[in-house]
Amino acid sequence: MKKLLLNTTFASACVFSTSQAATITYVDALHGLGGNTFSTTQGAPSADNSSWLANPAFDGDSTENNTQWNGRTFNGAGGTVYQAQPAAGGSIPELTTQITGLADGTYDIWIYYTENVNNGQNWFIDAGFTSGSLTTYGAINGTTVVDASSQTFSNSTDANFSGGAAAYLGQQTVVGGSTVDVFINHPGGNGGANRTVYNGVGYELIPEPSSTALSGMTAGLLLFRRKRV
């Protein structure tokens, strides 16, 4: 029985170690011709005419806007962000960020934004894989929303700043080079200090069990059968 426990434990350890090997690849949200982010209803632009974006120069403006996103140079983010801050009754366009060029496989998908729940402020974001049916993510809670600076990335990113939040959206499977569409919006038109500050998305390939791990599992099962015979 001790041999069985040792071998099956070894097989399990092999599976666990392979599943922990991957890191997250960050994809910055970029508008305009050739960019990956656009109004869902407008679709990918044929020219740099992002009508959903009020300040494409990213001028640091934090003014409320009822119908457009603002491009903003955000000090805490270490880069540029898209900000939605509609006044009460305002309606902001839903955005789509596309992840392309992925190899076939199943991926964990994350979204990156700024969270701030101090002094009565609520910086939340709506996100998901189905247009018009999104989940609201808010303050860092250690489960579905984590501190982005605690994550490991395979590339450079401006997402892992202090106050940066990473919300886990779920898994998506890529087949034949298909794209992964992530939809983003503001939770509601309430203006004031309530806003969405959107940075980008991330993906992490879920690795297949290695041949070593499978061999270990097979050996454990064979020992188990021999013990029972």
Image (cartoon, rainbow, N blue to C red):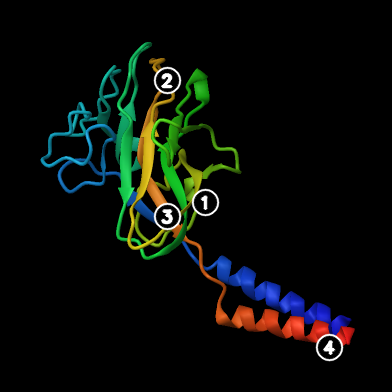
Q: Nearer the viewer, mark 2 or mark 1?
A: 2
Q: Nearer the viewer, residue 206 or 28?
A: 206
**N-terminal of the two: label 4 or label 1?**
1
- In the rendered image, which residue does mark 1 sit on? 150
The disc placed on residue 226 is 4
Residue that appears at 38% across and 43% down: 182
Q: Earlier in the sequence, mark 2 or mark 1?
A: 1
- Cα separation, mark 4 vs mark 3, equals 43 Å
Q: Helix, strand or loop at disc 3? A: strand
- Which x, y percent locates residue 24? 44, 58
- What is the three-letter code of the residue carrying label 4? Arg
Indicate the secondary structure of the residue bearing disc 4.
helix
C-alpha gap between disc 2 and disc 4: 63 Å
Q: Earlier in the sequence, mark 4 or mark 3?
A: 3
The answer to whether 96 is drawn above or below residue 20 in the figure is above
Which SS class for mark 1? helix
Query: What secondary structure is found at the residue carrying circle 2?
Result: loop
